[in-house]
Image (spheres, grey):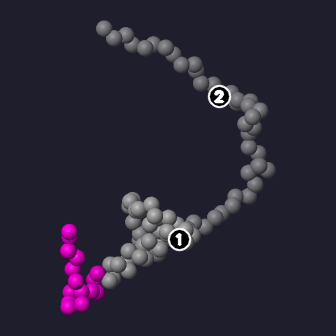
Amino acid sequence: MKHAITAKLPKKTSAKVNDPDNPAWTEDMLGEPVHRRGRGPQAAPTKVLTSIRLDADVLAFFKAQGSGYQSRINDVLRTQIELKLTRRPGPTTRKRVSA
């Protein structure tokens, strides 16, 4: 048979707590509110958050070029897509053969 827990919590009091390490805020401490403008919506086309695994040397190459390496990786991938879409199979284009 299970027994109910009957322990009572101490009653809450409405008395103010005097904590010297955490004093109450005063109007002088608050001062004037600072309004900051947010970043705003992202310009179209909206990018998608994703996770991708890259070879360590590939990532190191792009990171070594400084900030914005993710955008540069995106640009390289976009260039590859455009090349694939505009390239038409012909006498000068050979398909890869798997070994």
Residue at x 53% of width, y 71% of height? 68
Q: Secondary structure at mark 2?
A: loop
Q: Eyeballing the image, is 13 above or below 35?
A: above
Mark 1, secondary structure of its residue: loop
Residue 50 in view here: no
Disc 2: CA contacts within 10 A as few (<14), some (14-19) or many (>=20): few
Report the residue at 44% width, 71% height from top.
Answer: 73
- Residue 65 at x, y percent in the picture: 55, 72
80 vs 16: above or below: below
Distance, label 2 to label 1, CA atoms, is 54 Å
Tell me if mark 1 has few (under 14), some (14-19) or many (20+) residues whose alpha carbon lies within 10 angstroms of its own.
Answer: few
**Residue at the top extreme of this rendering:** 1
The residue at the point 43 percent across, 14 percent down is 5
**Amino acid type of the residue that numbered disc 2 sits on in the rendered structure:** Ser
How many badges with numbers are in the image?
Answer: 2
Is residue 8 something one can see in this rendering? yes
Q: Is residue 82 left or right of residue 57?
A: left
- The residue that disc 2 covers is 14
Location of the C terminus (image quadrant): bottom left
Q: Is residue 63 magenta?
A: no
Q: 49 left or right of 83? A: right
Instruction: Point out the residue furthest to the bottom here.
Output: 91
Which stretch is magenta?
Answer: 84-99
Toward the viewer: 99 or 66? Answer: 99
Quarter of the view holding residue 80: bottom left
**28, above or below 90, in the image:** above
Amino acid type of the residue tagged 1 in the rendering: Gly
Q: Where residue 68 is drawn, which disc sits there?
A: 1
Does the segment drawn in magenta span residue 93?
yes
